[in-house]
Image: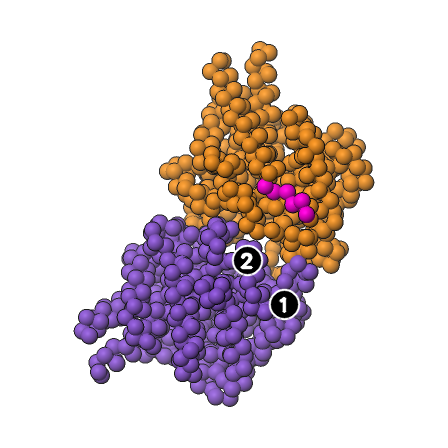
Chain colours: A purple, B orange
Amino acid sequence: GTMTTDRLEGYRARIQAELDQVVAYWLKHSHDKVYGGFFTCLAKDGKIYDELKYVWLQGRQVWMYCRLYRTMDRFHLPEILEAAKSGGEFLRRFAWVPSAGSTGKCAFCLTRDGQPVKVQRTIFSECFYVMAMDELSRVTGDEEMQAHAESVMDQLVHWVRVDPSGLGQPQLSGDRPVNSMAVPMMLLCLVEQLGEGRPGVAEKYSEVGSWCVQQILQHVQRDGNAILENVSTDGKELPGCQGRLQNPGHALEAGWFLLQYAAGRGDQELKKVAVDKFLELSFKAGWDPEHGGLLYFLDADGHCPTQLEWSMKLWWPHCEALVAFLMAYSQTKEPGLLDRFTQVYDYTFSHFPDAEHGEWFGYLDRRGSVELNFKGGPFKGFFHVPRCLFLCEKLLDALLAETRSS
Amino acid sequence: GTMTTDRLEGYRARIQAELDQVVAYWLKHSHDKVYGGFFTCLAKDGKIYDELKYVWLQGRQVWMYCRLYRTMDRFHLPEILEAAKSGGEFLRRFAWVPSAGSTGKCAFCLTRDGQPVKVQRTIFSECFYVMAMDELSRVTGDEEMQAHAESVMDQLVHWVRVDPSGLGQPQLSGDRPVNSMAVPMMLLCLVEQLGEGRPGVAEKYSEVGSWCVQQILQHVQRDGNAILENVSTDGKELPGCQGRLQNPGHALEAGWFLLQYAAGRGDQELKKVAVDKFLELSFKAGWDPEHGGLLYFLDADGHCPTQLEWSMKLWWPHCEALVAFLMAYSQTKEPGLLDRFTQVYDYTFSHFPDAEHGEWFGYLDRRGSVELNFKGGPFKGFFHVPRCLFLCEKLLDALLAETRSS
């Protein structure tokens, strides 16, 4: 009806304006014109308060710039392409540490001029590296870079499914292997990334994709009543805090990954699991009835989580929730899902954006006050906010186009 | 005067009662009678919510039990000695992971039955292991155990001063060596521990002790106006967030370590630096003028720290502040230092103790509300609270004895 159309028009206008303004903030403040790549430790007003370069965030910013350049006319700008290329070059020159792990690894953190500071014994730096290289190769047409992205992907699949020893983690008898939600989520994201518009590549990774989906579904536990962040590799609940941990924002992100995957294959059953479990259960577990907003961590038995930041309201779970509920609504047209979107939208837009200097604050306390006032930090870069706004704008465009044509 | 005596009597009565009650809580809830050692993940009411055994906390509990058993008549109880021995045996059997690092390391975390879960590439598990073994050997008279503690100490000194490669950290070109305050503090603590009442051992580690003091003093930066948590190995300020980080509770703890060291040597100059710099500067930087209590982290230039928990009020900085100001007062009799003690005491005793179930909450938000309601967790065990109460009771006893005899 018209009321719904008006609501959607309103959201679309605000979201487009926010996206423009967020892109402008990072174009203005984050580019390192001397050494290449991006500064990501940016204060409230855009000042650089630390020059370290976090590889996750370098990769994510390259990816986001390229995706905007490739798919949105108003961002098809030489300035954006050049920045993405500079970031890609910085990563190719400096991200790899040949002596790390058993066959080389990507650093987690580099100095401004590209010297490695820290290497993690996980797969995530390499994942964001692949995202960056693949998306960059799509805008530059660099086939060697695309092949390079694929070869790192193959290494990732080997680490995850065949032999993790190359990551450099010691094998300890008390350290049971864990299916941590982040791992199949990241791999699924890469499967979708690499396969887009390339039937041969999609076919090559098709089995990996369905394995990832199965691994993600193992996190539905307790007779379908809870999403748990860590489960055993045979899909059982793990003992203790690790096993009971819930991360609602992460589960909501997994939800929209599954919705996207299900839509691509017309899989109605998977769509239903994504909505009923990953979206609804996570929202109900994570939404703070007292102050609003999504809590960061919870314990499925109601114990207090041991993470000191458990009750904070972070920007990114709200970004993921916005995408998840809008995507679910656009696939189902269930009004209840648009209401959920509205609830998250109202909290998000009244708490996170900074009207004075632009961009969003990232970290609120339980009551909703800004507790860390920077715009970029070791884990907050040009990624969750613009990805959310970009995806929501696209979803709203499609919804509004349907409304108009009906 | 009588007013001061009355104040001190009041503090002493409350502190003694708290210590009794805290010891009772851990005796009742934390002992693993099946596998030995201690549960430390204890909920508000003492229930065990996770069975993992953190080696720092196992070692600290052994040390604290032994110290109470050895130096306070009312805790010279078979139950306490047996628990300490059980913890010591658990550590000797299970803490060492021969395959970790290049010559074996202590685990950071073990399963309930002693299987290693995680090994850190730092020195702290080994430090708390040495504290435990040395103090236990003092109550049991086990000379082999004392020699073992000393041999681990020699390994620690080698890692810190000669060659860190055995810790297993990769050497990365962007990762400059850092003088992190925790390292010389821990070594100094062990020098004092091992040397107590043993002139030969004290002599052996005397040079290490004065090296530690010099390393700690390098953290006085900015023309004597700030204590910084991390400095370069040649005593300069480091760039970025790492260099500007302040941890007032930690600097206050360093302060009373220095006071103790200075008192043992009659070093008036060091005493003055400890009070004027480590105590006063840290208190002024860390005390929250709005809500009271000590903030966890600060940035020396006033930027927002990147640690999500920076503005929380943790129990242990308050414990360290109580010890620091009471020790400084007892050494100087400066009334201003007793006023500082009073200010910290009033905040601490009105916010942290749990009148319902005993023991102290550990984690308050900036406003002083309990944000994590457990009594024990991965980093909170039987250590900071009882050590503080034990040291304060001893200091108050000495002060009151002086008053009575004057």
Amino acid bearing label 2: Gln
The residue lying at 47 percent from left, 32 percent from top is: B349
Magenta highlight range: B29-34
Q: Are marks 1 and 2 in contact (CB under 8 Å)?
A: no
Q: Quadrant of residue B256?
A: top right
The residue lying at 71 percent from left, 42 percent from top is: B86
Q: Is residue B126 magenta?
A: no
Q: Quadrant of residue B402?
A: top right
Camera-side residue: A391 or B279? A391
Residue B273 placed where, x, y %?
Answer: 57, 32
Camera-side residue: A299 or B180? A299
Disc number at residue A242? 2
Between disc 1 and disc 2, the foreground one is 2
Residue A371 placed where, x, y %?
Answer: 39, 50
Residue A135 placed where, x, y %?
Answer: 46, 78
Residue A197 placed where, x, y %?
Answer: 44, 86
